[in-house]
Amino acid sequence: MMNQYASATVVSAACNYIMERPDKFTHTYRTYVKLREHGKLELRFWHSNAIDSTWDTGLVARGGALGGQWRIEAAYVADGGTAPDGSVEPNSQVRVTFDGGSGARSVAPGEKFWSDPVKLDLPEGHLLAFTWTISTDAGGKTVPYNTEQMLVTAYDAPGVRADASDAEGFSLSENLLVMPALIASAKPVRQRLVFLGDSITQGVRTRRDGYEYWAARIADGLGSDYAAWNLGSGWARAYDAAAEGAWLSKVKLGQVPGTGTQIVLALGVNDIDIGARTSEQLLADLNTIITVLRQNDPSAEIILFTVPPFNFSEEREQIWRYVNEQIRSASLPGVDRVFDMAALLSQPAPLEHRLCREFMSSADDPHPNGAAGKVVADAFLAWYLGER
């Protein structure tokens, strides 16, 4: 399937949380995303009913856990216009079907599935609106989703509102991105890139609808004939991927054997921080990820990023320094190229472990801001295009 389709947006829909409610529910979710191409499109939507990465300490959501039983009552794509105001352009909605024409679909725990192809004419500069109504027959843990800061505008409404073109009943969503895992477009591409990382790859703390994070800026700089699938996930850590669960299976899906798919690995901050991993454990997890992806597709090219500065101190600072020394020395087998993101964002020595103040998203938050995203993307594009 991925031979014919490629990711059409840089918005990450990786799942790091799960709905847990006492009673059954029926609810509608509408999300606006900027696609990387416009005009007459053929789209398909792929979903994985599982949690990709661990949230916080894993009390509610742990990487690799399966989603519950739920049902898609209806799903639509539409021209979302130029402003995400909760409505869609009149008469632009096209129903998304499954399994050869069904407008509804029951979803089993851990299930992975594609929609049928859907055609839409999206004018230049307009957003895609994806709307679906989801229901459950019981309470408990059901639908996996992404709970980090919203990087795109989304709305939700109680009841069945998937086919509504107006905004009546919809409220602005916060920390609630309920989307298929992949929006894919039928098109030939020059190169496929998959970005596997944490909230810094996802773009957390940059402006909503701004597409300022480094993965988005890199995709813009390369152009739409390069396919870019962003699998950044807030709180994610390397051991989530090394466990070979749902998250790494998405990377494998993005690999088209024999085409030299490029995989950008940018992990380590949360392993050092809340994951409390030793340097040996983190390096072993990175080695596992690289080995598995190489086995899945020997033609793949692995680009490994250094771990960005995150204002670590004491033992965590020493782990950060040692891991980056190992990455820079190209000592990890199976890595084709190393990109030194940390050097671009760090303060001058001896404070390399601290993020430059102008790149801080706030006075006490070392998530890189949009300015940092530009610095990283500009340097990556110069390095990447210069090497090709």
Image (tube, helix red, strand yellow):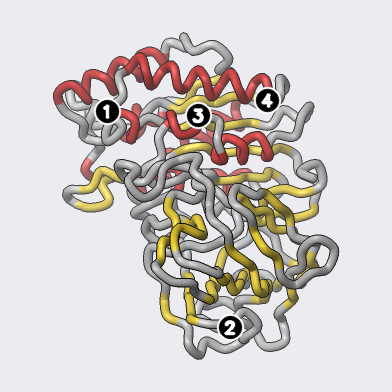
Who's the residue at 73% across and 54% down the image? 114
Who's the residue at 71% across and 52% down the image? 113
Mark 2 or 4: the one toward you: 2
Q: Which residue is mark 4?
A: 300
Q: In this rendering, does residue 217 appear at all?
A: no
For marks 4 and 3 on the same chain, the one whose residue lies earlier in the sequence: 3
Please tell me in which quadrant of the rendered image residue 347 appears. top left
Secondary structure of the residue carrying numbered label 4: loop
Packing grade of label 2 (10 A; few <14, some 14-19, many >=20) is many
The disc at residue 276 is: 1
| Rendered view: 349 above or below 70 | above
Residue type highlighted by circle 2: Arg
Q: CA distance from mark 1 to mark 4?
A: 30 Å
The disc at residue 161 is: 2
Secondary structure of the residue carrying numbered label 1: loop
Q: CA distance from mark 2 to mark 1?
A: 44 Å
